[in-house]
């Protein structure tokens, strides 16, 4: 299918940055609309439309724009956000608001980056918020919902995360040891997740799908 319009949130992050590049170079997409709080650095293409938006008030952000596939790579950490409330605003409220806005703009497929351990009933705050976000996006009723649950993300970020840097050093030793049920928790490159998101969107499967390490590697063609 050609002539699709993609909508992306979280384009300035590790996964989102790779995703925008992949979508801009794929002939299946005629237009890539990015919702961002600041202009994208280094991204240039006649297919690209950047909308500087206030994520606390997205209702009018896509006025007159129709989209097919919505990709959400929004996310932060409690340390960066500064508090649990601020973290929840980004990782739940902004994501659900973006999903609702995308649905109103015609999106039939929603592709969401979540995390391993996401569970709305978890006693762990981070996992509970991720699970609540998945639950509330699912309730919007997209024709297709693809949720990606990576383990530790590998790749170059603009901000340093010490835990991820240590994890990246240990990955060549730890990943081969993580077999069976632990395989889903293997570290994975941000670019691989981005490729998996695009691959899942183009595959066209309806319904709700949860993708962990093995499925993401498959969709990414790794």
Image (tube, grey):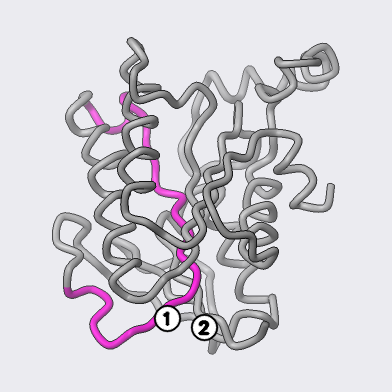
User: Residue 64 in magenta?
Assistant: yes
Report the disc number at residue 49.
1
Name which of mark 2 and mark 1 comes first in the sequence: 2
Question: Residue at the spot x=70%, y=47% of the render?
Answer: 192
Crowd rating for badge 1 (residues with CA inside 10 Å; few <14, some 14–19, many 20+): some
Between the C-alphas of marks 2 and 1, the distance is: 7 Å
Tell me whether circle 2 and circle 1 mark residues in contact (CB < 8 Å): yes
Report the disc number at residue 31.
2
SS label for mark 1:
strand
Q: Quick check: 153 above or below 198?
A: above
Crowd rating for badge 2 (residues with CA inside 10 Å; few <14, some 14–19, many 20+): many
User: Residue 152 in magenta?
Assistant: no
Question: Residue at the spot x=50%, y=21% of the render?
Answer: 117
Question: Percent position (x, y) of residue 106?
Answer: 37, 75
Q: Is residue 164 left or right of residue 101?
A: right
Question: Residue at the spot x=46%, y=38% of the render?
Answer: 159
Q: In this view, does 143 lie to the left or right of 53?
A: right
Q: Nearer the viewer, mark 2 or mark 1?
A: 2
SS label for mark 2:
strand
Q: What is the chief secondary structure element of the magenta stretch?
A: loop
Q: Quick check: 143 above or below 187?
A: below
Q: Nearer the viewer, residue 138 or 193?
A: 138
Image quadrant where one finds the N terminus? bottom right
Which range is magenta?
A: 60-82
Question: Percent position (x, y) of residue 179?
Answer: 81, 15
Question: Residue at the spot x=64%, y=65% of the render?
Answer: 204
Report the disc number at residue 39.
none
């Amino acid at each position: 299918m050609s002539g699709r319009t993609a909508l992306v949130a979280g384009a300035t992050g590790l996964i989102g940055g790779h995703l925008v590049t992949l979508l801009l170079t794929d002939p299946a997409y005629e237009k890539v609309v990015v919702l961002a709080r600041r202009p994208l650095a280094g991204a240039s293409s006649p297919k690209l439309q950047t909308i500087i938006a206030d994520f606390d008030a997205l209702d009018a952000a896509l006025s007159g724009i129709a989209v097919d596939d919505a990709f959400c790579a929004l996310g932060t950490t409690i340390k960066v956000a500064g508090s649990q409330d601020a973290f929840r605003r980004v990782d739940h409220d902004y994501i659900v608001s973006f999903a609702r806005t995308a649905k109103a703009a015609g999106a039939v497929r929603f592709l969401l980056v979540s995390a391993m351990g996401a569970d709305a009933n978890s006693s762990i705050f981070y996992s509970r918020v991720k699970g609540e976000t998945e639950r509330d996006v699912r309730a919007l009723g997209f024709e297709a919902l693809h949720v990606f649950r990576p383990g530790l993300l590998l790749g170059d970020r603009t901000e340093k995360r010490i835990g991820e840097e240590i994890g990246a050093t240990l990955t060549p030793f730890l990943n081969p040891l993580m077999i069976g049920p632990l395989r889903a928790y293997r570290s994975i490159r941000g670019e691989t997740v981005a490729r998996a998101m695009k691959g899942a969107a183009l595959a066209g499967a309806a319904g709700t799908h949860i993708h962990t390490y093995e499925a993401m590697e498959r969709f990414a063609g790794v």
